[in-house]
Amino acid sequence: MPWNETNAMEQRIQFIRDWLKKTHCVSDLCALYGISRKSAYKWIDRYMNDGADWAMDRSNAAAVVHNKTPVEVEQALMQMRLRHRTWGARKLLHQVGLEQPQLMLPQESTVCDMLKRNGLITAKPRRRSIGHPGRPSSVVSGPNDSWSADFKGQFKTGDGLYCYPLTVTDNYSRYILGCQALAGTLLEPTKAAFTRLFKEHGLPRSIKTDNGVPFSAPTLGRLSQLSVWWLKLGVLPVLTEPGKPQQNGRHERMHKTLKDETLKPPAGNSRAQQRKFNIFRQEFNEVRPHEALDMNTPAQLHVASPRQMPDKLAAVEYPDRFEVRYVSANGGIRWHKQWVNVTSALKGEYVGLEAIDDGVWDVYFSFKKIGRLHERHMRIEDHMGQFRRHA
């Protein structure tokens, strides 16, 4: 046996001796022997389960002939599985042991291998991981460069009905563009509120929100029907990281003032609450000086966006180098005569695909990259990026 292999075996044996003494915890032993916790627990598991040759290198241990599970044992387990198609290895071993105690039954892992080998386990499709673009930029260059939107926490008015205030601000001037009392966070009322704001103030370059509905959804690119509409208007949806409201700090600070001045106590009904919101908005925008604005009011810095909301949405266009595909009603596209899932949020729309390597394509909707198609697996993985450069 080569010296380096002998040395490795001696190290494993000495590690187990020290572990059995129970004078050090596993973490301390790992530091002492210069190994990872994964390796340590692997050695412990081999010592506990593999018998006398546990310390051998697997390359040599593999040459040792182990007893194969007897045919009658495998047949008994597989017949039990056919009788109980939803049972796993542990239940199968328990029941076969009760009915045929004379059999020497294998480990659970061996039974799992048997089930796979006999086609009795169907692998579940792996769910697509939904990524996140990460921390949004806080740089704002001028009015309408970035808006923020959120639903300030719901509360009950005096009549016992819930109110969900939708608030929208310009991040440069702190100007409150809208504060509307809605009955919920449904798409259509929210879209109607933004339509009024876009017609009155023009279109921003981006809108920053949290990851809640209707701003985001657990789909490819975190696209919701609302954010798809924004993208078709040329407005980039920007998401804060989950659980980090401080990334939309200017907006959250306004919420605190809003709560102090309009919700203590709430009004008797939604209409009365809206009047309180309107009074607060007018004072916040036009009367209340803002320290971060050198004691100017938001109205003194705010101007409407030169980008007007169109009467009709234009078709999404892509550069000539892109492959363009239609997203069907089932949320997928056809690619090389195969169906590839995209997202139901884009049904009826067109996506663009840009080749970046052999068999690898970046997938865009409008100017936002939403994923990456790997032809080898015919699957679009979430690959959060920025937006494409127009060519």
Image (spheres, helix red, strand yellow):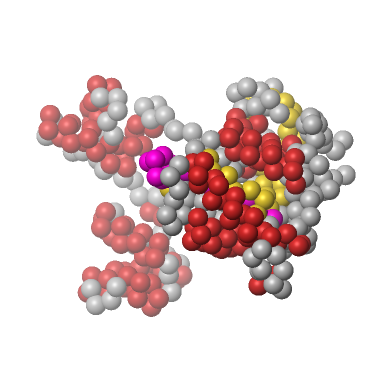
Question: Which image quadrant for residue 283?
Answer: bottom right
Q: Going 36% across and 27% down the picture, which residue do you hit? A: 120
Question: Which image quadrant for residue 321?
Answer: top right
Instruction: Estimate the x, y position of residue 251 in percent, counting from the top left.
Output: 60, 58
Instruction: Work out whether residue 123 or residue 112 is closer to the camera in this orientation and state it.
Output: 123
Instruction: Estimate the x, y position of residue 151 in percent, counting from the top left.
Output: 53, 48
Query: Could one spot residue 88 in this view of the protein?
Result: yes
Seen in the image, is 107 located left or right of residue 132?
Answer: left
Report if residue 122 lies within the magenta region.
no
Badge count: 0
Query: Could one spot residue 247 in this view of the protein?
Result: no
Is 349 above or below relative to 201?
above
Q: Going 56% across and 50% down the picture, which residue do you hit? A: 277
Is 230 above or below relative to 332?
below
Q: Quadrant of the C terminus?
A: top right
Instruction: Estimate the x, y position of residue 19 in percent, counting from the top left.
Output: 27, 71
Q: Quadrant of the N terminus?
A: bottom left
Report if residue 170 lies within the magenta region.
yes
Seen in the image, is 86 located left or right of residue 189?
Answer: left
Question: Which image quadrant for residue 158?
Answer: top left
Q: Going 69% across and 22% down the picture, which residue do you hit? A: 337
Seen in the image, is 373 located left or right of residue 64?
Answer: right
Q: What segment is highlighted magenta in the picture?
A: 156-171
Seen in the image, is 350 located left or right of residue 168?
Answer: right
Name the magenta segment's main secondary structure. Answer: strand
Is 200 above or below relative to 171?
above
Instruction: Work out whether residue 276 or residue 239 is closer to the camera in this orientation and state it.
Output: 276
Instruction: Estimate the x, y position of residue 301 in percent, counting from the top left.
Output: 76, 62
Instruction: Work out whether residue 74 or residue 28 is closer to the camera in this orientation and state it.
Output: 28
Q: Going 36% across and 37% down the picture, which residue do you hit? A: 113
